[in-house]
Image (cartoon, rainbow, N blue to C red):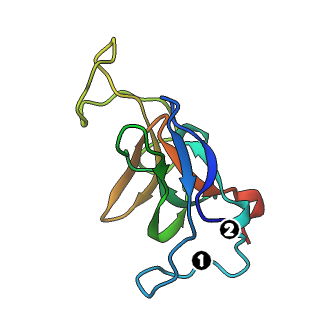
Amino acid sequence: MITHQHVGTDSAGTPLVTGPRPEDDEFEALPEGTDLDAARMVRAHEVRDGDLILAHFPESEPGTPREADYFTTAYPARLGHPCGERHQCHTDQYEIGDTPDHQVRYAVLDFTPGDGCDIWLRNEPILIIPATVTP
């Protein structure tokens, strides 16, 4: 991937950018044949079963882009496990904020025994490689 490639914006219009995925020993190798050039940004509720989840975009200082923060282990989305299907839900597990109905909507992208559910805010930007292009 090209350093600081613009891949979209968040819901507030802040640019989202990617840099190269680190290649040090801390990061597990991606599956053989994975094409990082196929990576794209989607919202959590747009992730499909089998998409390879690469990174999230942490909040940034006002006026600066949100840069992809790669996970040390990329993982495939596994929807519909004991957490439930990918869906809009309500939870009081997170700080509520200013939503009119005092609820936070989220998407469940994975379940790992011992780790539990992988819960993301519904519109949170995520860097993925779609399942249709993963080896």
Give residue 36's quadrant in the image: bottom right
- The residue under label 2 is 36
Residue 135 pos. (x, y %): 74, 72
From the viewer's perspective, is 12 left or right of 2? Answer: left
- Above or below residue 24? Residue 121 is above
Which residue sits furthest right? 132
- Above or below residue 47? Residue 53 is below
Residue 46 pos. (x, y %): 61, 40
What amino acid type should be assigned to the residue bearing mark 1?
Answer: Leu
- The residue under label 1 is 30
- Res. 25 visible in picture: yes
Q: Are marks 1 and 2 in contact (CB under 8 Å)?
A: yes
* Residue closer to the observer: 133 or 116: 133
Distance CA(mark 1)–CA(mark 2): 9 Å
Q: Residue at x 49, y 81 (%)?
A: 28
* Residue closer to the observer: 86 or 27: 27
The kind of secondary structure element at disc 1 is loop
What amino acid type should be assigned to the residue bearing mark 2?
Answer: Leu
Query: Nearer the viewer's eye, disc 1 or disc 2?
Result: 2
Residue 121 pos. (x, y %): 41, 37
Q: Residue at x 37, y 45 (%)?
A: 59
